[in-house]
Image (cartoon, rainbow, N blue to C red):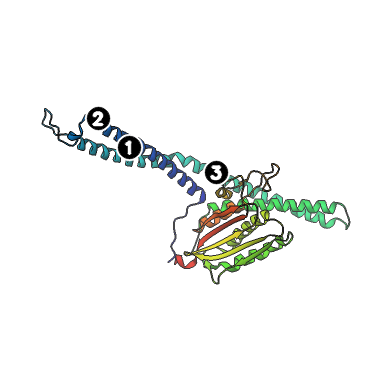
Amino acid sequence: MTDRRSFVDGDTRAVRRASRMVGLQITVAFAAVVLAIVLGVFVFVDSRVKPSELFEAVPDNADLDVSAEIVLRVAILLGLALIVIAGVLSWFVTRRAVKPLGEALRIQRNFVADASHELRTPLTVLDARLQLLQRSLPAGDPSVSIVEDLRGDTRSLIVVVNDLLESVEAAGSRPSGSPAAVPLGPVVRLAVESMRVLGAERGVEIEFSHPDEVETFLPAASANRCMVALLDNALRFSPDGSTIRVELAVVKGMARVSVRDHGPGIRGIDPSRVFDRFAHAGPAVDGGGSTRTGFGIGLSLVRDIVVRNGGSVSVVDSSENGTEIAFSVPVAHTRL
């Protein structure tokens, strides 16, 4: 029997994580106030009672025995009760407070999906018309190169629109049916072979090593999309003539795929934020000019796909010697 956990999309996870952090901060602040009050009670009692009489019963006219020990115990118990109450209330309040944020993210996702659908068709038609124009031009026509550049720009826009639509669908859809086990090695190898063509233009080699028979429930198309995004990112920042290393291994019941380049590393942004949609790394990676280097939505799509399939993705290392990004998904047998 497959262990099917309740589906939670990436936006909902982010909202819940934010609510937990806010609730925790409120609870910690309230606990500090309560502890300060308890300490103040102790200091006040200690200043009013001699040390030898601190824990002695003090009779009053109503024959009620009260000692500093009892006062302190009551203060501590009340303080603990207040901390628990504050924690519960802060959890409810923050969940309610961030609910509009979750709704805003849902509306944003729907807008991106609608806009992507509306843009896809006219861009496809434009590319087809440019292709017809390109074929109709005679050989040697000076406009051939211009039309070719226009087609390249159009194809780039189509890729961006497709990525946007796929990212929204990956983040907002629910896994259906019983997934089939997929050998991950051949999928990764196929992506590596296809991206080697792009690397060869600049003398960048892509090396790949992996063990045999690593199966996961990550669909082959999704795994290929993740690998293409990671390799495209690595190629973008790799210097000419360098090497990109791709490794597939099984670590603690997880299939782990890592991609390491020898570029200048992630600069001007926290490494964990490169998975945010349209994240930018600040100044150019070569340290000059004011050009902002974008990570696009490829890495954001990787995060959405991997998290949706029970895994995780992170920047393992980033320095002037290069960057390593890795994602992990459960191997097939762990979900049987």
Please, what secondary structure does the residue beneath circle 3 have? helix
Residue in view at x 49 percent, y 67 percent: 332
- Where 47 falls versus 254 (above or below)? above
| Image quarter (top left, top right, bottom left or bottom right) of the C terminus | bottom left
**Label 1 – label 2 distance at C-alpha:** 18 Å
**Which of the two residues, 100 or 335, is positioned nearer the viewer here?**
335
Q: Which mark is residue 47?
A: 2
The residue carrying pointer 3 sits among few (fewer than 14), some (14 to 19) or many (20 or more) residues within 10 Å by Cα, namely few
The residue carrying pointer 1 sits among few (fewer than 14), some (14 to 19) or many (20 or more) residues within 10 Å by Cα, namely some
| Mark 1 vs 3, N-terminal side | 1
Residue 120 is situated, as x and y percent measured from the top left of the image, at: 67, 51
- Residue type marked 2: Ser
Residue in view at x 82 percent, y 51 percent: 146
Q: Which mark is residue 107?
A: 3
- Where 140 falls versus 36 (above or below)? below
Q: Name the residue at the top extreme.
A: 61
**Label 3 – label 2 distance at C-alpha:** 60 Å
